[in-house]
Amino acid sequence: MPEIETARLRLRPYTLDDVDETAVILSNPEVMKYSPRGPIPEDQVKEVTQQILEFFIQHWKQHGFGVWAVVDKATNKLLGHCGLNFLPNTPEVEVLYRLDQAYWNQGIATEATKASLRYGFEEVNLDKIVAITLPEHTASRRVMEKAGLKYEKDAHFYNLDVVYYALTRAAWQPDESSYTLLL
């Protein structure tokens, strides 16, 4: 599984050694507020986190793309995750991201999202990448818009009413400085 480096970040494959650090992030109700699964009960955080990481690892093995652990290059601290995932019960690929609250509003999600989009279009040869969020999640919508995705419609995924954004390869504007691919 490849790794990506951006100006500030390293996007690397998750391993099960990341469960404890990731569980701390996912245990924060504010981080999980807009997640389709919602906040995770404290007594289930480690188990649910392990299931999530196993899913991400398996997705990479099965499809050749997936969700990376987002790590600060300077400190090697795990900040959250970002990457590409199939939307349930569809052939569509979504870009998703979730960061520790201490790293919000710093452009990190946008930086990681742009790198994920570039990987999806250049390496996976996807024709379209989508993103969804709850309509009231304005911070997530800003990340989508800054990364170049455009609102298309209201939709229903994960048993939730969401806003649906999309970007086609033809409309995508590559940012040549967005990342370095490491194999």
Image (spheres, rainbow, N blue to C red):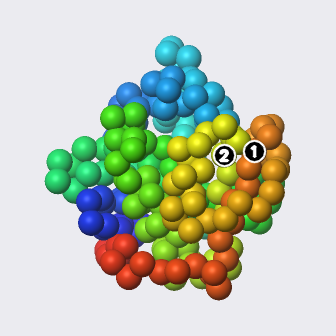
* Residue closer to the observer: 46 or 108: 108
The picture places residue 123, in percent across and down from the top left corner, at 51, 80
Task: Give the crowd class for mark 2: few <14, some 14-19, many >=20 residues within 10 Å.
Answer: many
Q: What amino acid is found at the position of numbered circle 1 in the picture?
A: Val
Residue named by callout 2: 133
> Marks 1 and 2: in contact by CB < 8 Å?
yes
Residue type indicated by callout 2? Thr
Which secondary structure lies at badge 2? strand
What residue lies at 39% left-to-right and 37% top-to-bottom? 100
- The spot of residue 54 in percent (x, y) is 52, 45
Task: State left or right for residue 84 relative to residue 23.
Answer: right
**Residue designated by label 1:** 162
Considering only vertical position in the picture, is 40 above or below 67? above
- What residue do we see at 80% from left, 57% from top? 153
Residue 70 position in % (x across, y down): 37, 52
How many neighbours does mark 1 have within 10 angstroms: few (below 14), some (14-19), or many (20 or more)?
Answer: some
Identified at 51% across, 23% down, the residue is: 29
Q: Quadrant of residue 73?
A: bottom left
